[in-house]
Amino acid sequence: MSKQDKIVLSYHDSLLRNSDVFLLKNSHWLNDAIIGFYFEYLEQTLESNDNSKNIKLFSPEVTQLLKMTDQEFPFISTDMDYIFFPLNNCKNSDAAGGSHWSLLVYSKAEKTCFHFDSAHGNNNSEARSFGLKISKQLHGDEAARFKNVQCPQQDNGYDCGIFVLCFTDAILEHLKSSPSVETCNFSKVKSLGIDKRRKLLDLIKILSQENIFRSMFPGVTIKNYADAMSAALKAAVSRVSARQKSLKDRSKETPHQTPRKKKIAADFYEGIYKRHPENINPSQGYENTPPERQVMRDS
């Protein structure tokens, strides 16, 4: 691994490096790191939203291990309502590889393994074989159905991974209002795929920034920090508004109304009185003396 291939994001059980993120910036085939990260993100989101359905999304690495072994899978339980598997056509059990991704979804209520392939037929044999393994463990001799679903098809040779992610998004959204995978509408999958790479890049950037925040402010949640910053900003705005009002009110005062200006006027009048006493008739009395002079005599 190159020393320049720095870690971009560490997210729960997923780790993304520069070389992984680069695959999202151009027309590249997605690797297992990107797909595994997004499945991890979706599962964490489901858990945080207190989803009532028991939904499990397995990573490509675990799916490949399950696909290549003949043993039963201890981490697959009959309590799981839906299980998502990102499949590829790699024949190697201990190394990454393959050239095509597709999605296998097990539905407990429908007793069916649904296969979604954006290049229809490419992964059919791998998916059928793997689906039978899953069905045998969960249902014993009563095998579940296997169904290749008619779904939107990719127009190039590299977007199969993007379609797997978009199929997953569409199904999870559909399951919020329906228990049936079979009735899911995939009409928007192609339009979702157009911006999927950009949205993944944005998501990785946001999560990376959140990691930096947590390292700088351990124990402080982003929500609490945002609330505190919002309160501080409101207080600052309130202080500025009060200051501006005070300055505006002072600007309306006449020159002899402010203490400092009163004293300046009094001193000025005192100077005139000393130089030209003939201009002021003391016999007029205090009340007939101009206000500035009154202030001087009171001080």
Image: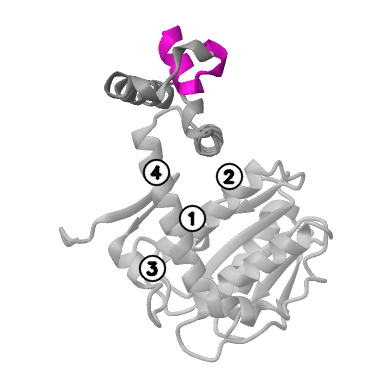
Kind of residue indicated by mark 4: Asn
How far is disc 4 from disc 2 in space, using C-alphas? 29 Å
Residue 92 is marked as 3
Residue contact between numbered discs 4 and 2, judged by CB atoms under 8 Å: no
- Neighbourhood count class around disc 3 (C-alpha, 10 Å): few under 14, some 14–19, many 20 upward: few
Residue contact between numbered discs 2 and 1, judged by CB atoms under 8 Å: yes
Q: Which residue is mark 2?
A: 75
Residue 272 horizontal/vertical position (percent): 32, 25
Q: Earlier in the sequence, mark 4 or mark 2?
A: 2
Foreground tag (4 vs 2): 4
Q: Which residue is mark 1?
A: 62
How far is disc 1 from disc 4 in space, using C-alphas? 26 Å
236 is higher (above) or lower (below) than 44: above
Residue range highlighted in magenta: 285-299
- Neighbourhood count class around disc 4 (C-alpha, 10 Å): few under 14, some 14–19, many 20 upward: some
Residue 211 is marked as 4
Kind of residue indicated by mark 2: Phe
